[in-house]
Amino acid sequence: MLAIQYEDFGAPDVLHLRDVATPEPGPGEVLVDLRAASVIPADWKLRAGHLKGMFPVTFPKIPGRDGVGIVSKLGDGVDYVSLGDPVCVIAQHTENGTHAQCIVRDRDTLVPLPVGMDFNHAAALMHAGICAWICLVEDARVQPGQRVLVQGGAGSIGSLGIQLAKHLGAHVTTTCRAANAAFVREMGADAVLAYDEVDFAETPDRFDVIFDLIGGDTHRKSYALLKPGGHMVCLRAAPIEDLSAQYGVTMHVPVVHDRLYAIEATVKLAEEGVFRPQIARLLPLAEAAEAQRTLEAGEVTRGRVVLEIPPR
Ligand SMILES: NC(=O)c1ccc[n+]([C@@H]2O[C@H](COP(=O)([O-])OP(=O)(O)OC[C@H]3O[C@@H](n4cnc5c(N)ncnc54)[C@H](OP(=O)(O)O)[C@@H]3O)[C@@H](O)[C@H]2O)c1
């Protein structure tokens, strides 16, 4: 099978398209022929060596945190899918990933393709949707009528976060560059703070929940916008300092655990039309290095870069 591999940390040019052995499913496992996979910020951060303390990898490493394809071989005893089923899969950073023509998965790392969704949009959905669900439903427990600020609403997780917070009945404000104001409103945002035109920290609004996907200075300045007892939920972006005690609020960085119930909740929300994943750019598998380069350069906006994977 064809796969993207790297054998050392470094610049995008450490990524190579190689012909490698197709893995074999063991008992309880299946082989999935992948058709699409997303490229996420952590793919380039891991490749550059920034996450090696957190996620030890074995070289050669195949990147890719999620993917979509068709079940092509069943291991002994598999009764949870059939040959030819379209499925979405999840892979951890510490194992070989989805930027390849095939991957072996098991019952806990695979769900049916959302009904009515194509492969590319499902690839744009999976990891980002799971992150948004874990942060806003499981961690922040957003309630109807709450005011939510999404820091980074034009990104993949941010745009799905807006859609989910609206679905949960919240009033949603988001930050983005001015050129993306119409886009985030289309995602469902009620109010927009354009970070290249205004200082978001000067808004008179106060929030029950802030979903921070930016970190750094944005994180530090966000605490003052929380209501007393409010909650900040963050993913690991620019380094943050926990100032929650000083502001009388709570702050949490949840683990993106990918348990089956979170993956299934993500698929269900897509089938209900709540999650409308956005594709920023489609590239062939062979251009995975270009995909990571654009992400690293901050050139990607309004959704995911998705790799289209040719059939074997
Ligand atoms: N386990 C974890 O902790 C975990 C899991 C997933 C993701 N993450 C991290 O979460 C972050 C977001 O992930 P993602 O996949 O959504 O990334 P993404 O799709 O690449 O998001 C990029 C977006 O960030 C926005 N942005 C940049 N600077 C901004 C600012 N100062 N204020 C507001 N928006 C700003 C940009 O908006 P404009 O285009 O409008 O400028 C851009 O659309 C990444 O850093 C990622 O590594 C961590």
Image (cartoon, helix red, strand yellow):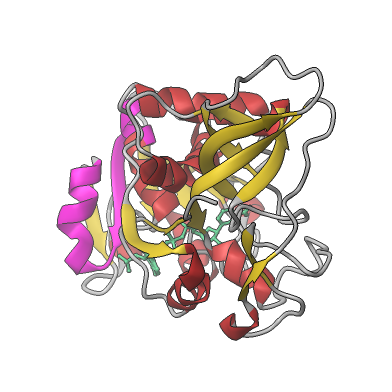
Relative to 167, is 218 on the left or the right?
A: right
**Residue visible at 66% across and 78% down in the picture:** 48
In the rendered image, which quarter is residue 255 located in?
top right
Decide which of 189, 274 is in the foreground and name it.
274
Q: Is residue 300 above or below residue 15?
A: above
Relative to 301, is 95 on the left or the right?
A: right
* Outermost left residue: 182
**Residue visible at 70% across and 14% down in the picture:** 79
Decide which of 248, 274 is in the foreground and name it.
274
Rendered location of residue 35, percent (x, y):
48, 47
Q: Is residue 105 above or below residue 269?
A: below
**Residue visible at 71% across and 41% down in the picture:** 104
Query: In which of the image's four quarters is ligand 1 placed?
Result: bottom left
Rendered location of residue 287, percent (x, y):
47, 72
Rendered location of residue 8, percent (x, y):
76, 80
Q: Which residues are magenta?
A: 164-187
**Residue visible at 52% across and 65% down in the picture:** 220
Rendered location of residue 162, percent (x, y):
34, 42
Residue 89 seen in the current view: yes
Q: Is residue 31 above or below residue 301?
A: above
Decide which of 305, 283 is in the foreground and name it.
283
Q: Is residue 166 magenta?
A: yes
Q: Is residue 115 magenta?
A: no
Relative to 234, is 222 on the left or the right?
A: left
* Outermost front residue: 312
Q: Is residue 147 above or below residue 274?
A: below
Decide which of 86, 204 is in the foreground and name it.
86
Residue 189 seen in the current view: no
Count of numbered circles on the image? 0
In the rendered image, which quarter is residue 13 located in?
bottom right
The quarter of the rendered structure image containing the N terminus is: bottom right
